[in-house]
Structure formats: structure tokens, C-alpha cells
Image (cartoon, helix red, strand yellow):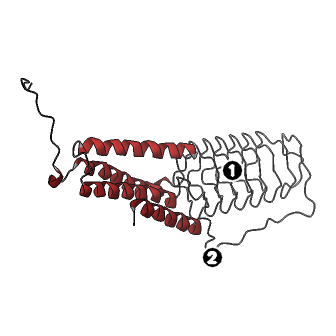
Amino acid sequence: MPFSRLSRAMGALLIIAAITTTGATPAGAEPVRAPQCPETRAQLAGQHITSLEGLPDLTCADLHDAVLDGLDLGQEDLSGVDAHGASFRNADLVQATLTGANLRGAHFDGADLSQAELDTTDARDATFTEADLSQADLTGADLRGADFTGASLTQADLVRADLRGARTVFTEAIQADTADAKVDVLDPRTFQASLIAILVGLALLVKSLIDVVRGNTPGDRALNRGLTRLGIYAVVNVMLWVMAGMLLPLMYIVVLYPLLIGALLVYLSGAVRGYRPARFGGHDPAPFQVGSSRR
């Protein structure tokens, strides 16, 4: 099979495998917890709230488009609230419970959500810029299109969360649990996408070995050729991560090993081009001209 057809076939198989594994629902998933709502839901939509004094029970409350900036909501039960489009900028939500809440398009910029319970929330297109979500529970949360730029997700629980399209530039995600999280198939942070690096390295290495066998290699400067290809490989990977908003990928450790293997293969693909079989005539340095002298 020609080399180009082989490489296309390998790429197609990888994409098919990625599609079949991404977004799969794990067996034995925990059922969604339904919040216990009061008989009468508090109607606070669009209001500018500056204090909790005199407010009714906020469980399952209607808070859409409400403004709660800077409010102390630590350990408050906000489970089941409808807060789409609401603003919680710089609010204190430490250990707050927002299980099953509708937070679509809500603003949590600069808020403290450490150890908060946000499991099964709908937080599509919500903004968490510079927010503290360390040790927060986001199990099964819908975070598509959410903005976590500069946020802290250290030790956060993102099991089965939907992170497709989420922006995490400069996001700190040390020891975050992203098991079974859904991400875009070709997002550089995914394991299956990082396998492409190995395929690319293998393809280049095989092509170089074929050139060696056919005598189509220059046969000089092996080290320089290997380092040049390695440099190009590194630049392309950095560009892909930056374009995907994944300067600090959530699954960095998972994708690191395939990328390193790919880097080794890319280097070898350049280095072997420095070898030329003797039967094709080894590399012959340029002869000295008559009258020239060595220095």
C-alpha cells in the first residue's frame, strides 16, 4: 500500500476510535440528585440583592438575571435555583450548594466557590474568570462553552462533566479529576488526540527509512536535521494548545506521554536522513580547490 494511503487509513482508524470512546456514559453512573424544593419558590428575578436579611428560602428560587455581586452566600443552599444570566461576581460561595441549578450564562468572575457543590448544574456559557473552584464538586455538570480563564480548579471533581468548548487559558487544574469527562474529539488535551502525535512521528520515520533504502537521503548533518524537525514539532504543538485555549491542559499528564513519544519519533525521522547507504555513495564533503589550504 502506498505510504500516503497508509497514513490516511491510520488517521481514519484513530478518529473512529476517538468518536466511539468520547462522551460515552460509564456503567454504574450515580443517579442525578433532585433538589428538595419548597412549595412556594422565591421570586427574585432581576432584583439587585445586597443582603440576605429578610429573604425567603433560596432553594429552587427564581434568580434569573438577578445581581448578587459581592454577596456572602457561604454554605447557603441554592440547589435547584434558576439563575441563568445572574451575576455572582466576587461573591462568597464557599461550601455553597448549587446542585442541579440552572447557571446558564451566569457570571461568577472573581467569586470564591471553593468546596462548593455544583454537581449536575447546567452552566453552559457561564463565566468563571479568576474564580476559585478548588475542591469544588462539578460531577456531571454541563460546562459547554464555559470560561475558566485564570480560574483555579485545583483538586476539583470534574468526573463526567461536559467540557466541550470550555475555555481554560491559564487555568490551574492541579490534581483535578477529569475521569470520563466529555471533551471535543480533536481537542489537544484529550488522550486520543495526542495519539495523533505518535502517528505523525511514525509516518515521518517510516518515510525517512524508505528514503534511506532508496538512497534519497542527503547523508549529512544527522543531529541538525533531527533537531530541526523536533523544533517544528514543538512549535506546532504549542500553537495547537494555544488555539484550543489549553495553555495549561486539564489532562496534561495524560497527554504528555504520547507527545513525548511522538517527539522522539519525529527527531529520529530527521536524524536517519543523515545516513546514506554506501552502495549509493556516502556523503562526500566538498573537495578542496587547488591551492587552498586548511586553517
Q: Is residue 247 visible?
A: no
x%, y% of residue 166?
A: 64, 50
- First reached walking from the N terminus: tag 2 or tag 1: 2
User: Is 98 or 151 nearer to us in this picture?
Assistant: 151
- Report the front residue among 60 and 260: 260
Does residue 45 appear to the left or right of 90 in the view shown? Answer: right
- Residue 156: quadrant of the picture: bottom right
Q: Secondary structure at mark 2?
A: loop
- The local secondary structure at tag 1 comes to loop
Viewer-proximal residue among 123 and 76: 123
The residue lying toward the viewer, choosing from 185 and 109, is 185
Comparing labels 2 and 1, the label whose residue is closer to the camera: 1
Task: Tell me: residue 290, above or below residue 205.
Answer: above
Q: CA distance from mark 2 to mark 1?
A: 27 Å
Point 65% across, 43% down: residue: 131
Q: Quadrant of residue 171?
A: top right
Tag of residue 264: none
Binning the other alpha carbons within 10 Å of mark 2 as few (below 14), some (14 to 19) or many (20 upward) gives few
The picture places residue 8, in percent across and down from the top left corner, at 47, 61
Location of residue 260 in the rendering, given as x and y in whole percent from the top left corner: 38, 53
Pointer 1: what residue? 145
Alpha-carbon neighbours of circle 1 within 10 Å: few (<14), some, or many (≥20)? some
Residue pointed to by mark 2 = 28
Q: Residue at x 52, y 51 (%)?
A: 174
Residue 294 versus residue 260 in the image, above or below: above
Which residue appears farthest toward the bottom when viewing the image? 28
Query: Quarter of the image containing the C terminus?
Result: top left
Q: Is residue 187 left or right of residue 221?
A: right
Q: Indicate left or right for 62 with 1 as reference.
A: right
Q: Amino acid at mark 1?
A: Gly
* C-beta proximity under 8 Å, tags 2 and 1: no
Q: Is residue 273 left or right of residue 77?
A: left
